Amino acid sequence: MEPFLPGLNLRPRLLAAGVTDKELRRLRREGALATVRPGAYLYRSDDRSTDAAARHLLAVHAAAAQLSAGAVVSHVSAAVVHGLPLWFLPPTQPRSTGCTPRAIGGPALGSAL
């Protein structure tokens, strides 16, 4: 089985497929892999590796697995997911919003992923 698939490659799946952290570092250093966010990689030859909105969408997908129940993608991240125009706002790091108020120990609303 080829450990690297087209599109987003997440570190836990790669490790389970036998890829080592040393190999990941080497591939990033050689320029074969682009880091979308920590633990999420994309082949450098993939057109999405140079498009800011496409990279942001990939980062949202990579972060989504870490969201708690009740959290949703929000802000510019939601606009990118829904294919809305961004005007002149470049996407930065993925954003989410939790529905649990901070006052009772939940996450801050509008937190970065």
Image: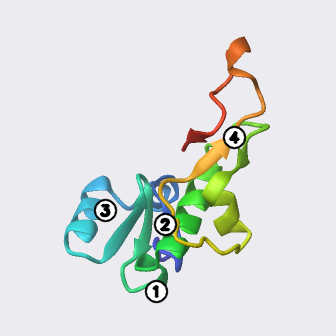
Q: Amino acid at mark 1?
A: Asp
Q: Amino acid at mark 4?
A: Thr
Residue appearing at x 72%, y 35% in the figure:
98
> Label 4 belongs to which residue?
97
SS class of the residue under badge 3? helix
> Label 2 belongs to which residue?
90
**Mark 1 touching mark 4, by CB under 8 A?**
no
Counting residues from the N terminus, which is met first, the one under dot 4 or under dot 3?
3
Q: Amino acid at mark 2?
A: Pro
Counting residues from the N terminus, which is met first, the one under dot 4 or under dot 2?
2
Residue appearing at x 68%, y 20% in the figure:
102
> Label 1 belongs to which residue?
47
Is the residue 28 above or below the residue 15 in the image? below
Q: Position of residue 74 (x, y in %)?
A: 69, 51
SS class of the residue under badge 1? helix
Q: Real-space Cα distance between discs 4 and 3?
A: 31 Å
Q: Residues within 10 Å of mark 4 (few under 14, many from 20)?
A: some
Is 54 placed left or right of 106 in the picture? left
Pair 1/4: label in front: 4
Q: Real-space Cα distance between discs 1 and 4?
A: 29 Å
Q: Position of residue 64 (x, y in %)?
A: 64, 51
Q: Real-space Cα distance between discs 3 and 1?
A: 20 Å
The answer to which of 11 and 45 lies nearer the viewer is 45
